[in-house]
Amino acid sequence: MKRMLVAPSMLAADFANLAKDIELVNANADIFHLDIMDGVFVPNISYGTPLIEAICKRASIPVEAHLMIVEPQKFFDIYKSLGVGSISVHYEACNHLDRTINRIKELGMKAGVAINPHTNVHLLEDIVRISDYILIMSVNPGYGGQKYIPYCTGKIAELKKIIQKNNPDCLIEVDGGVTTGNIEEIAESGADVVVAGSAVFSAKDPAEAIKKLQGLA
Ligand code: DX5
Ligand code: ZN
């Protein structure tokens, strides 16, 4: 398997022992993945600025925020000031996505477009030209620990073709239900980055689970 970048979702971390889980990610993974939910765009609320600040303060690898919220642009400046390096916003939550992506880039962060499972990748043919990454949701967003939706593998492969044609530098990130059991299929279909919550933090040996997802074990 090729080397994958692994972004543990801190939603699955032990919030009562956060320092320990932050150190685990610092020492073994590639990116911190922070899931921000507002109870409006998705039917759940996760965590906000104080926790993002705490993680950013201790992170020694890049931090990305996945914004499952309406009006995401309200938070770009504050997240930038906290040290967030990449922000993804949902296609389904933005009426002026070109402006939104450009604003993230103007602030000096990497900009990603996230799509729900039902959103067709061909809708991204134009926006991939200015995006640093596309995040394909492979579960319905709102909760960790769900099962991977099998038809998403075909979406990754289709998006890969679009990216090769329109912006080969744009990365593909896959988020939801990623495990050591389906990582090969996800990697082979063209993904570059995987998010993993339960597959990392519920594993007996989280460091070993990260290595397997990276294709190093
Ligand atoms: C779901 C989040 C995911 C999720 C991943 O709304 O965007 O990042 O926490 O968790 P697992 O890997 O457990 O599916
Ligand atoms: Zn996520």
Image (spheres, grey):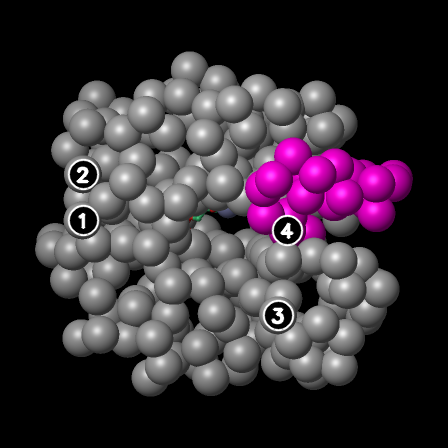
> Which residue position is annotated with label 1?
27
Real-space Cα separation, disc 3 to disc 4, in angstroms:
12 Å
The reply to whether the C-beta atoms of the residues labelled 1 and 4 are less than 8 Å apart is no
Residue 127 figure quarter: bottom right
Q: Is residue 108 magenta?
A: yes
Which amino acid type is shown beneath numbered disc 2? Glu
Q: Nearer the viewer, mark 3 or mark 2?
A: 3
Question: Of marks 3 and 2, which one's residue comes earlier in the chain?
Answer: 2
- Horizontal side of residue 18 vs 165, given as left or right: left
Which amino acid type is shown beneath numbered disc 3? Asp
Q: Is residue 188 magenta?
A: no
Vertical comparison of 135 with 61: above or below: below
**The one of 26 and 155 positioned closer to us in this rendering:** 26
Q: Residue furthest left?
A: 205
Q: Which residues are magenta?
A: 93-113
Q: Residues within 10 Å of mark 4 (few under 14, many from 20)?
A: many
Q: Is residue 51 visible?
A: yes
Real-space Cα separation, disc 1 to disc 4, in angstroms:
25 Å
Residue 189 place in picture, x, y as percent: 53, 81
